Image (cartoon, grey):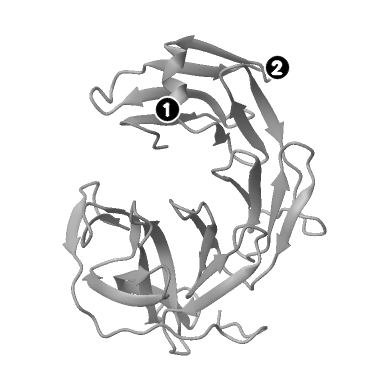
Amino acid sequence: MAGLDGFFAVKHHTFSEPPVRVLTAHHVSAPELPLARLAIDDAFQVTGSGDQSAWDKLPRLYDLVYPYLLEFTPESARIIRLPGIPGEPETPDDPYRTIPCPDAATAIVTQTRRGRFVVYDLSDGAVRADVSLGVGPPIFRFHPSTGLPWMARHDTIVKFDAAWRPVQMARIRESVRGSVISEMAFHPSGSVAAVAYSERRPVPMIQPYRLAPVEGSVLLVDTEAMEVVSGAATDRWVDDIAFISNSRLALRERDGDIEVRFIDAGPVDVRLHPPRPAGEEWL
C-alpha cells in the first residue's frame, strides 16, 4: 500500500487466522529493507519493532482479509472484526471482500459477484450505507482531492456523494454484450480517471456458449464532465494501471509477464452512455 514521500507497506499473507499476520514498512530508496514491522499473534495482539515513525507516512487502516481489519495509530493498534452483509450470508462462490476507506473511519464489506455492499462505521459498527446496484464485482476508488468514492462494476462507472448516494453514472459501451471494467485509477490531480476495460465476445468454453473478455482499451475520463478525453488500446485485460504523466500510463496486463508496459493515450472517438435501466442485466 502506497503512503507519503516514497513510503509503502507490504502485507505478508499466511494460512492462519487472520490470513495477514505481518505488515512491514519500506521506502522506495531501499525497497528490500523493512524499516518497521507489525506482527499479530495468536491472541490477536499487535506488537511493533523497528522504526515505528515510518508508519506516520502510511495508511492507518489495513485489510487483513475479511472479516479482519488492522487499525494502527501512533498510540495503539487494534484488530477490528466486521460483520457481514445483512440477509446475505457469505458463500464459497461469492465470498465477501473488505475495503478500508481512506478516512480510516469506515470500511466496505462487499460481495464479490452479486455487487451489494455495506459501509460500516468503525467506531460503533453502525451501517452508514447499504447499496445494491446490480450484479458484478465492484471496484472502489476514492477521488484524491475530494475523497469521494467512485465505483466501477462490469460496464458502468458510478460517482457517489459523501452519503454514498449515486450522483452520476455512465456506461462504457452500448452493445448488448457490454464490456468488463477491470481497473480504474485517478490521476494525482483528480482531473481524470483511467478506466481499463475489455470487450466481451463469444468464445468456446466448457459451457456451450459464453461471453468472455478479450483485448480492450484504457479510456481517460474527465471526472467533472464524465466524458472521454483520450484513450489507448491494450492487448489484454489490464490488471493494474498508474499514471506516469498526464497522458502516459504504466500497466500490467492479465496473463502477461511481470514486466510493466507503457502506453500513451491519444485522441479517440468514444462517448459514454446512460446506465442500464434498473433490473436490466446481461450476464
Q: Identify whether 77 is placed above or below 109.
A: above
Q: Is residue 135 left or right of 207 when viewed as pictured?
A: right
Identified by mark 1, the residue type is Lys
Residue 180 in which image quadrant = bottom left
- To which quarter of the image does residue 91 belong? bottom right
Q: Quadrant of the C terminus?
A: bottom right
Residue lying at 72% horizontally and 40% vertically, measured from the top left: 82
Amino acid type for the residue under numbered disc 2: Ala
Q: Which x, y percent locates residue 181?
A: 43, 68
Residue 11 vertical placement versus 88 (above, below)? above
Report how far apart the C-alphas of labels 1 and 2 lie in the structure. Answer: 27 Å
Q: Nearest the camera: 219 or 145? A: 145
Instruction: Relative to 179, say whether 30 is above or below.
Output: above
Q: Which residue is identified by label 1?
A: 57
Side (left or right) of 40 relative to 37: right
Q: Secondary structure at mark 2?
A: loop
Disc 1 secondary structure class: helix
Q: Residue at x 37, y 33 (%)?
A: 4
Residue 251: which quarter of the image?
A: bottom left
Q: Residue at the location (37% across, 66% down)?
A: 195
Instruction: Tell which circle, 1 or 2, labels the residue nearer the N-terminal end.
Output: 2
According to the picture, the residue beneath numbered tag 2 turns out to be 43
Using a 10 Å C-alpha cutoff, classify the residue at mark 2 as few (fewer than 14 neighbours), some (14 to 19) or many (20 or more): few
Residue 82, above or below 113: above
Crowd tier of the residue under label 1, counting other residues whose Cα lies within 10 Å: few below 14, some 14–19, many 20 or above? some
Residue 115 or residue 146, whichever sits in front: 146
Q: Residue at x 38, y 57 (%)?
A: 190
Residue nearest the viewer, comparing 85 with 161: 161
| Position in image of residue 216 (x %, y %) | 30, 73
Q: Please indicate whether residue 91 sits to the left or right of residue 156 in the image.
A: right
Rendered location of residue 243, percent (x, y): 27, 54
Residue 18, label in figure: none
